[in-house]
Amino acid sequence: MLALTNPYIIVSLFSYITDLIRGINDPEHPLTLEELHVIQEELITLDNDNNTVDVYFTPTIPHCSMATLIGLSIRVKLLRCLPARFKVKVEVTPGKYISKCCRAIICHRSYITNS
């Protein structure tokens, strides 16, 4: 059995996570979140030791009406596809969105796990 601390396994898991997210379609446009630059690889972190995945996404405009739906889509995709040991946090990139209500809905500090 391969150890979960193996760097190759961690890189593979990170690639899997980014592949899952980049394929999500935007709710308003016939493009993926990656094509719209809503998701960027450098804003995704994987902490295998603490079993956490943090994702920051950037809405296309500061008052995007679909930001909550996009955030929830990312969260649900990861919770359904990742092992149950992972805690997933999805947040809007700081300073990139004007609605605090949206941040409260998707990005509350208590983690939702798929267990």
Image (cartoon, rainbow, N blue to C red):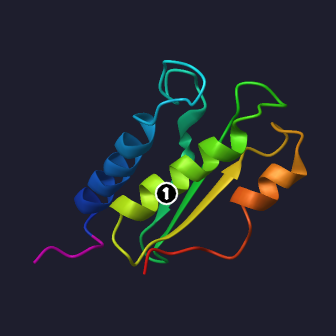
The quadrant in which residue 26 appears is top right
Residue 90 x %, y %: 62, 56
Q: Secondary structure at mark 1?
A: helix
Residue at 45% over, 36% down: 24
* Residue of label 1: 76
Query: Does 10 appear above or below 95?
Result: below
Residue at 41% over, 70% down: 48
Crowding near the residue tagged with mark 1, few <14, some 14–19, many ≥20 C-alpha atoms within 10 Å = some
Q: Decide whether residue 109 is among the magenta residues.
A: no
Residue 68 x %, y %: 70, 46
Relative horizontal placement of residue 1, taking residue 3 as reference (left or right): left
Relative horizontal placement of residue 14, taking residue 100 as reference (left or right): left
Q: Amino acid at mark 1?
A: Val
The answer, for residue 10, to whether it is visible in the render is: yes
Residue at 80% over, 46% down: 94
What segment is highlighted magenta in the picture? Answer: 1-5
Query: Does 102 appear above or below 115?
Result: above
Q: Main secondary structure of the magenta part?
A: loop
Relative horizontal placement of residue 47, taking residue 11 as reference (left or right): right
Query: Does 96 appear above or below 71?
Result: above
Residue 96 x %, y %: 81, 36
Name the residue nearer the viewer: 13 or 106: 106
Residue at the far top in the pictured view:
30
Query: Does 82 appear above or below 22?
Result: below
Q: Quadrant of the C terminus?
A: bottom left
The answer, for residue 44, to whether it is visible in the render is: no
Name the residue nearer the viewer: 27 or 79: 27
Residue 85 x %, y %: 40, 78
Name the residue nearer the viewer: 113 or 87: 113
**Badge count:** 1
Name the residue nearer the viewer: 99 or 92: 99
